[in-house]
Image (cartoon, helix red, strand yellow):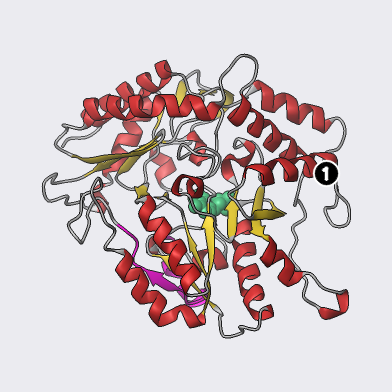
Amino acid sequence: MKDYETLPPVVVDRGEGARLFGVDGKTYIDIVGSWWCNLLGHCNPHINNAIKRQLDSLEHVIFAHFSHPPAIEYAERLCAVLPAGLCKLHFSDNGSSAVECALKMSFQYQAQMGKPRKQRFMCLSEGYHGETIGALSVGAMDVFTGVFKPLLVDSIRIPAPDCYRCPYGQERASCACPCLDAARAVFERHADECCALIAEPLLQGAAGMRIYPEEYLRGLRALCDNYDVLFIADEIATGFGRTGELFACARAGISPDLMCLSKSITGGYLPFSVLAVTQPIYDAFYADYSARRAFLHSHTFSGNPLGCAAALAVLDLLLNGRDGAAPALQTARGNAVWLHETLQSALGGHPHVGEIRAINLINAIELVADKRAKTPFPPARRTGRQIYKKALELGLLLRPLGDVLYFNPPLNTERSILAEAAALCKQSIETGIQW
Ligand SMILES: Cc1ncc(COP(=O)(O)O)c(C=O)c1O
């Protein structure tokens, strides 16, 4: 709040594609996709129309015993494109709620499968899964969880891969994932008492867009199988094309037991989330009323029809394209290498750019005090924030994660806008701070 006294909030009253328009007449390129949820541009005409049409027939309805056509159609269309085996859906209204739901369901599942000792959760260090107490309990970032420690459930942490500062001295291109040994050791010790492992597949977003190898994700899946632990993929940030495939798990060729989806699911329009699970999980809760095996968990706005209408329009645009435009998934893939090369040639040689890592259109630029030693800047210096301020002045919304600047734009952003953003980013880094 005090920061706002020197940098007042930006008030925007209009958006179009990747651009936001301030009430003061300034324009901003939303290169962070409004916290990674804006998937297909602001005020996308196809999504707008889908919501408007839905609004004139049904805005919301109780989602218990009652349903509605957009929910039915969405369930069918989503299940058809989910990784193999995921076939039952539970609707909520934000990412953290989907995570809570996954944790509770895994816990109850193991109890109902006759394994009541399996009560704890495993997670990756540096992971982020949301702000509610359960989600914080499996989040490992002290900056978010520290003060709440006495309230949290004690989860078991696996040291996450850190490919930029790899403690095993491996290079990304040739890595054989020796860090999986540490994960294996944790499974050997704790799997008996664990119901599930939760992880962000391939990309730990809040940790600073840390990208790890597909091989590591496949390794985690195999460990879960071998040690009878459910695998929860938190695809809230990675789902719907962000990593170049519809889901990060698909990119690695694996299927989780439970998958959390939100953010881009409605193109970033509406609070909406889905937990997708397998048939065996569904079956563990299926019984006569008197058996008391049901999963008792609901939210007022679960399955909101406007959200379903937006989510359906998102699938159209991602997979099929509309009005002559190519499928957005394809457009993003077509621009990904070019964007990374553009940023690399603009900034790769900068003495304080330690690494530019990329997966699809997501590019993370890690700023360091010493490039060779990969030493971070002292946090009190707020290096990322200085550059954020400069970028705002120049018309670029480049909100950093600490000292990691990143691009995570709408998938259908035109190359000319990406090029403009890259140039503004370079200018912000070069002029935003006294190095
Ligand atoms: C991987 C991941 N999981 C969960 C969440 C929480 O989602 P929400 O903010 O909708 O509660 C986020 C939000 O950034 C996220 O990145």
Q: Position of residue 333 (x, y in %)?
A: 44, 29
Q: Is residue 343 visible?
A: yes
Residue at 32%, 58% (x, y): give it: 161
Q: Position of residue 295 (x, y in %)?
A: 74, 69
Q: Name the residue under label 1.
A: 60
Q: Is residue 14 above or below residue 378?
A: above
Camera-side residue of 275 and 174: 174
Q: Is residue 95 visible?
A: no
Residue at 60%, 35% (x, y): give it: 267
Q: Where is residue 257 in the image (x, y as percent from the top left)?
A: 58, 61
Magenta span contains residue 150: yes
Q: How crowded is mark 1: few (under 14 residues within 10 Å), some or many (20 or more)?
A: some
Magenta span contains residue 326: no
Secondary structure at numbered mark 1: loop
Residue at 76%, 45% (x, y): give it: 304
Camera-side residue of 382 and 418: 418
Residue range (magenta):
144-161
